[in-house]
């Protein structure tokens, strides 16, 4: 019976084929498989009950109208509780009704594309790279056209983003969601008419940013009064709930939630481009106080770190931050507070709208890149290093103290459960891991920038609705496939901090 079961079991990842079909009578078709199918078909990612199974999910590459076709040579005859999986019923929970229309109707719509079709929302940015011309469009989920497009592509989230879940587009807070669509724009040489090909998208959710400040006590504290135990009066920065207040103007955190570049468009620096566009949008959005990310994975983390470092390096105020080598290194006791100018660093961070954890990671990377070559951590053995001077050794020691302090604060609960000797050893291991990670990212960033120089992609012109401006290319050899599920080597509480 086991052999028979195997003959009727198919790999869901192999059987499932997704296609982007360009509109027109001879539209080009790009095919690819999903990365994950366990959110739909279970942990084993297998489908029982068919032989030669094919699940074809085709998309009109322009408006992303889907069409589902299921084919097989044989179906298992139901015996007791053993029966074939109802694939259509399972997928109906992830696809809109239009996906189940007859294939001939879908092809008929595909063959007659609209000449005036454009992506929903407003054109935010356009750019050109070696893969062609691309545009980023932005719209609110409260817009029916944006909502329709998101409903059509939502199934791609669990298929490509590990741990990714779809948005409930019918919730009352739909207006809190902003969607950024990335499209390739092609022009037919025969009639000069443009065709849009969907390449990826990102969603951003706005959380109210309630900044609370303690109000000083109305009476002086007596010798027996503890300010820690006394109640603190809280004063809000804005009148939440006041009918005259426009909620879109209230302070908020803007969190990148879903981020997806489809496989045919990966490894073209498009993930970095889209991230840069999203970031710049909220950098110039006054109500946004911080730009955060939900559960980033390794590929997205690398892209984010490199782009954030490149962006911050363009700021003279960030470049001015440096290690104060006159700071004495204590043998015991707390880490000195003046290793860097903390007030100046906080000012840069708030202007850049980056969370503390992310900003200080990038700052540590920047300061490490400035260490003398004789002490700077690397990703391999370098026997040609010069003998370090006393100043270089001290600067490196101060840098490590600053790093250890941040890591200890983030991991205080876990480290606090260890004995002192174990705590010191564990913290040292984490520091070495972070040093290697920073060195790896700095090398990766240098390689990418060299590649960009060789390809001549130093500067691009983008449109932002207010005319033209020049911006440096944000090219990164990234996968850009998702945002989800990656815990950094040194700590895991970014989401807790950002929420």
Image: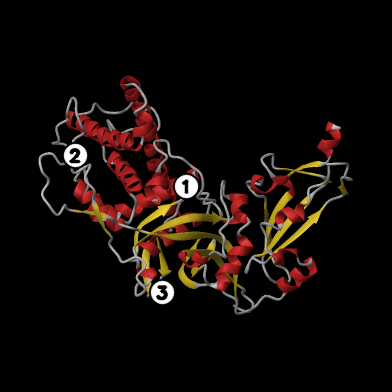
Between 280 and 494, the residue placed more toward the observer is: 494
Nearest to viewer (mark 1 / mark 3) = 1
State which tag comes first along the sequence, 1 or 3: 1
Count residues near mark 3 (Cα–Cα under 10 Å), then give few for <14, some for 14-19, many for 20+: few
Instruction: State the CA–CA distance, disc 1 to disc 3.
Output: 30 Å
- The label number, if any, that marks residue 153 in the structure image: none
Q: Secondary structure at mark 2?
A: loop
Count residues near mark 1 (Cα–Cα under 10 Å), then give few for <14, some for 14-19, many for 20+: many
Q: Quadrant of residue 229?
A: top left
Q: Which residue is tagged 1?
A: 296
Q: Which residue is tagged 2?
A: 337
Instruction: State the CA–CA distance, disc 2 to disc 1.
Output: 30 Å
Give the residue at x 68% y 70%. Answer: 23
Residue 224, compared with residue 110, is above or below; it is above
Position of 214 compared to 310: left or right?
A: left
- The label number, if any, that marks residue 465 in the structure image: 3
Position of 33 compared to 279: left or right?
A: right
Give the residue at x 71% y 58%. Answer: 92
Figure disc tally: 3
């Amino acid at each position: 019976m086991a052999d028979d079961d195997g003959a009727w079991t198919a790999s869901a990842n192999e059987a499932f084929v997704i296609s982007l079909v360009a509109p027109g009578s001879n539209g080009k078709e790009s095919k690819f498989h999903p990365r994950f199918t366990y959110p739909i078909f279970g942990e084993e990612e297998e489908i029982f009950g068919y032989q030669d199974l094919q699940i074809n999910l085709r998309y009109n590459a322009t408006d992303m109208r889907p069409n589902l076709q299921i084919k097989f040579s044989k179906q298992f005859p139901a015996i007791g509780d053993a029966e074939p999986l109802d694939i259509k019923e399972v997928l109906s929970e992830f696809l809109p009704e239009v996906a189940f229309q007859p294939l001939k109707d879908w092809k008929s719509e595909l063959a007659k594309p609209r000449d005036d079709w454009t992506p929903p929302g407003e054109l935010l940015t356009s750019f050109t790279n070696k893969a062609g011309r691309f545009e980023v469009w932005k719209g609110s989920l409260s817009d029916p056209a944006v909502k329709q497009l998101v409903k059509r592509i939502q199934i791609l989230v669990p298929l490509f983003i590990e741990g990714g879940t779809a948005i409930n587009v019918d919730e009352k807070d739909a207006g809190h969601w902003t969607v950024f669509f990335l499209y390739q724009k092609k022009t037919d040489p025969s009639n000069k008419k443009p065709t849009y090909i969907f390449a990826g998208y990102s969603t951003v959710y706005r959380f109210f940013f309630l900044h609370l400040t303690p109000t000083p006590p109305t009476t002086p504290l007596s010798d027996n009064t503890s300010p820690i135990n006394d109640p603190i009066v809280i004063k809000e920065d804005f009148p939440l709930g006041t009918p005259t207040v426009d909620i879109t103007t209230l302070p908020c955190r803007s969190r990148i939630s879903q981020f997806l570049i489809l496989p045919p468009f990966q490894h073209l620096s498009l993930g970095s481009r889209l991230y840069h566009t999203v970031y710049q949008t909220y950098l110039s959005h006054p109500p946004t106080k911080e730009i955060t990310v939900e559960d980033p994975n390794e590929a997205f983390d690398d892209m984010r770190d490199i782009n954030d470092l490149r962006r911050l390096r363009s700021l003279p105020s960030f470049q001015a931050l440096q290690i104060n080598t006159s700071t004495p290194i204590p043998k015991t006791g707390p880490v000195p507070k003046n290793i860097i100018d903390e007030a100046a660093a906080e000012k840069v961070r708030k202007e850049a709208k980056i969370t503390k954890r992310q900003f200080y990671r990038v700052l540590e990377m920047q300061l490490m890149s400035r260490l003398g070559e004789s002490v700077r951590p690397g990703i391999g053995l370098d026997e040609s290093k010069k003998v370090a001077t006393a100043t270089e050794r001290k600067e490196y020691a101060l840098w490590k103290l600053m790093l250890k302090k941040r890591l200890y604060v983030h991991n205080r609960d876990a480290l606090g459960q260890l004995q002192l000797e174990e705590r010191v050893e564990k913290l040292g291991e984490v520091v070495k891991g972070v040093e290697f990670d920073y060195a790896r990212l700095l090398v990766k960033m240098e390689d990418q920038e060299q590649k960009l120089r060789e390809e001549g992609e130093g500067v691009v012109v983008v449109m932002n609705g207010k005319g033209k401006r020049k911006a440096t290319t944000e090219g990164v050899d990234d996968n850009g496939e998702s945002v989800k599920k990656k815990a950094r080597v040194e700590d895991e509480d970014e989401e807790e901090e950002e929420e």
